[in-house]
Amino acid sequence: MATLKFLSFLILQIFCIIEVANSQGVEVGFYKKTCPNVEAIVKQTTAHYISRAPTLAAPLLRMHFHDCFVRGCDGSVLLNSTKGNQAEKDAIPNQSLRGFQVIDAAKSALEQECPGIVSCSDILALAARDAVELINGPTWAVPLGRRDGRVSILLDALKNLPTPFDNFTTLKTTFGSLGLNVKDLAVLSGGHTIGMSHCFSFSSRMYNFTGKGDTDPKMDQNYIGRLKIKCKPGDVTTIVEMDPGSFKSFDTDYYTMVSKRRGLFASDAALLTDSQTKAYVLSQLNPYASTFFKDFGESMIKMGKIGVLTGKAGEIRKHCAFRN
């Protein structure tokens, strides 16, 4: 009996050791000994592409969001479909993502510098940060040490990604399930200060809000009029700026647009339906008193820790689009 108890205790201790090894947190400077130039290499690669196509910044940031909201920040959004199984990349919300070549180029450079060391999920987190900084946005210290996941399923993306049609209750639930609070919701929504969107993502607000051919009363009617010039009923190809006038520059103009009821999506308008998120929107209207840049970095660090694989979990992919 004593021997059995000892063996049970020993097995429990082994499981505890394994669990600790697999749950070690990410940290700033994770590669300082194994690949000290990792951040410089990713930034140089990202800058090479952004200097030629500044509009890539928005999809790179969005790619990191979409990665973290599905199975955690494990690089699963980068995987291609295999053997007839459709990956997250194939889901409708991800079909408009661009910038995969930036991640692939950074990975290729890092494999020459320190082969088999840096994960694709870490590269994506760094590239998203660098892309924002390169278009006059904030910067932040990115904790590293993520490992890459081996699973990528289309239905997971459809089920877990927030949509432009979500109301505040749905958004709060989605963000909350991942450990993000209401302030994070308001802050991370500010990522819509850059980028473009297809008309179908908000066309119901202009043409058929309640199914009776009406417009969304929470949207400025003059703004709707201007959008109707660009977006005709049934248009699935035209794209428009999410933050008209400064969609290539990371700034606080998004909150000005939302405060004027000119947020493009229903999810943007939802920020005005809750007292806490509305207060945050209004607090960012004075660019000289805005805390958005600091807040954005803090929320990005928090988001970047969602569901990370560390220790011996997952893998370090040789190529970001394929499992080893």
Image: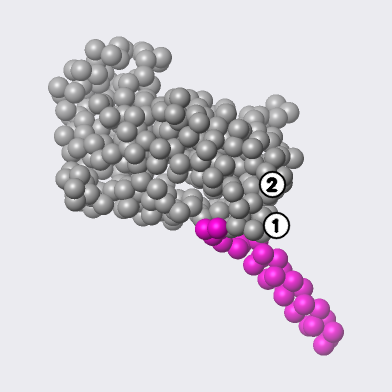
Which residue was labeled with disc 2? 114
- Amino acid type at image mark 1: Lys
Quarter of the rendering containing residue 210? top left
Percent across and percent down for residue 246 are 28, 29
Q: Residue at x 18, y 17 (%)?
A: 225
| Label 1 sits on residue | 312
Locate the N terminus and report the quarter of the image it occupies: bottom right
- Which amino acid lies under the numbered mark 2 shown in the image of this protein? Cys
Residue shown at 20%/44% (left/top)? 287
Nearest the viewer among 291 and 268 is 291
Query: Of tags 1 and 2, which is closer to the observer?
Result: 2
Taking the spot 25% from the left edge, 40% from the top edge, the residue there is 252
Looking at the image, residue 301 sits to the left or right of residue 45; the answer is left
Residue 139 visible here: yes
Q: Secondary structure at mark 2?
A: loop
Distance of mark 1 from mark 2, alpha carbons? 19 Å
